[in-house]
Amino acid sequence: MKTIGNTQDKRKWRRDVTTSRFFQATMACALAVSFVSCSSIDPREVDLELAETAPAVKVTNYTQALPELGLMTEIYSTDILRIQSNPIGDVTGASQSTGSEIPRDITEMIKTTLNSMGGHVLFIPYDPAFIQNQQVTGYSNFENKEIPEVVLSGGITEFDRGLITRGENTDLSLEAEIKSLPGDFLPSKNIGLRHSDEGKAGLARITLDFNMLNFQTLAGIPKINAVNTMEVLKGVAGKELGISLFGQNFGLKGTIKKVQGRHHAVRLLVELSMIQIVGKYLAIPYWRLLGEDALPDPVVTHALARAYASQEEVDITKMVQRWLYIYGHDVPLNGVLDEKTKTALVAVDPDFNLSDNRISSDTFVKVYVNIPISYEAGARQQEMVNLVNAQESVEEVASESTDLVPVTEATPALADSQTTSEQENLENGATAASGEGSSTSPQAEAQSTYAQQDTVLRTSPAEEMPKSQKPTYVAGPKRTGIGKFLTEEEW
């Protein structure tokens, strides 16, 4: 029995020695690898490579919407909007107290935004120091300078920091002991795993206010303003992973901090506000450029409703026919609601009933709001303008020719007073017709007729319009809120 017991003890001792040597060899190899890897990185020669990026064009969510708004002003034939901006900046004082976390002056952003629209939007800068210096140098006489129609005022009115601050933390720890290992050469028989995930986020809000003023009176234009707000976030996140092997600890740890650009948010608010305030003033459906989730602006829709209520049925039909022509429907432009016009209306507004003899307010608004925004529509609009101008010119010449036909009783008086104006001749002719008669020759009567014919030729629109001047026409009736916002007094 002693021999058998001694044999088992020796085998156990040999097995423990083999295991011990194996772990010793493993630890030695690990230390050697660690030493080689550490020795290849000299702490005194630490370096960091930064990625290089090329300059790029600034692109935002509204970069494409700005020129499309300019194209919309051309298609809707709005008046030229000559707009100027006051110096606009931070009125909260947060730009100084927060170390320029938000911009102090946003005037240049407004200039770039307005100048990016094009079309019928003309930006006029406000720089009195530059104008004064140029007058001193004599480089410009400032005779042909554009005069603003409206002026912008506003600023950054809110910057609320720390509205919400929220933190989260997750910890996971596992540990186990391996009792079968000999304890004479390892500091510990335990192995462990630890994972940590933590984060913290904060919310802030930025608000911009803009108002449009009449340049002549410096009074605010009612309802032409824009107030937009945007929430910006910042957050910090960190993760940690640790492993413990027999008393030795290994781990990885990383942290990151992200802040949504405050200056970028202000630029977005500026671009959105300029689209809104210009669209409101010109009474065009600008919200179509802001995405599918954008809602119609009640300022514009109410202006359309008032325009519809203030027009005669014939004028409404003419307006809708001109808009349908821009759509691509070759309808007559005579103000008659014929079958061809009704068919085109059904194509644009499926809710229109062919049996209706008048255009409803809903159809009126739908046709106006959904006019295509494309270069093809712009070409159709110009074609329609030429047709309408030609039609109106013919009607005007015919009307003036009819009005200036000489009356038999008035002709002698015109022949007797050739040195007076034509208006005076007509008045004197009427007086002479009712009073004493005067003798005139057929030659004098013929001369008066030729003079009247010459008056008709000289007063025709074709002669009055310079060749370099392009014909202009507002797609809707002038001064009715279509393509131009009006105040309550103008209504």
Image (tube, rainbow, N blue to C red):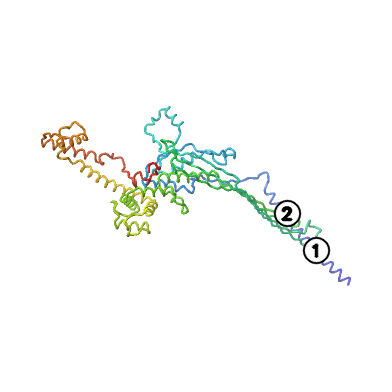
Q: Amino acid at mark 1?
A: Asp
Q: Residues within 10 Å of mark 2 (few under 14, many from 20)?
A: few
Q: Residues within 10 Å of mark 1 (few under 14, many from 20)?
A: some
Residue corresponding to mark 2: 249
Which residue is the extreme one toward the front?
435
198 or 424, which lies in front?
424
Q: Is residue 440 above or below residue 301?
A: above
Q: Position of residue 486 (x, y in %)?
A: 39, 43
Q: Is residue 358 left or right of residue 225?
A: left
Task: Determine the image quadrant of residue 120.
Answer: top left
Image quarter in which the N terminus is found: bottom right
Residue corresponding to mark 1: 16
Q: Is residue 205 left or right of residue 168?
A: left
Q: Position of residue 388 (x, y in %)?
A: 29, 47
Image quarter in which the C terminus is found: top left
Q: Is residue 359 left or right of residue 222?
A: left
Considering the numbered disc 2 on the image, is that residue within a helix, a strand or a loop?
strand
Q: Position of residue 281 (x, y in %)?
A: 42, 44
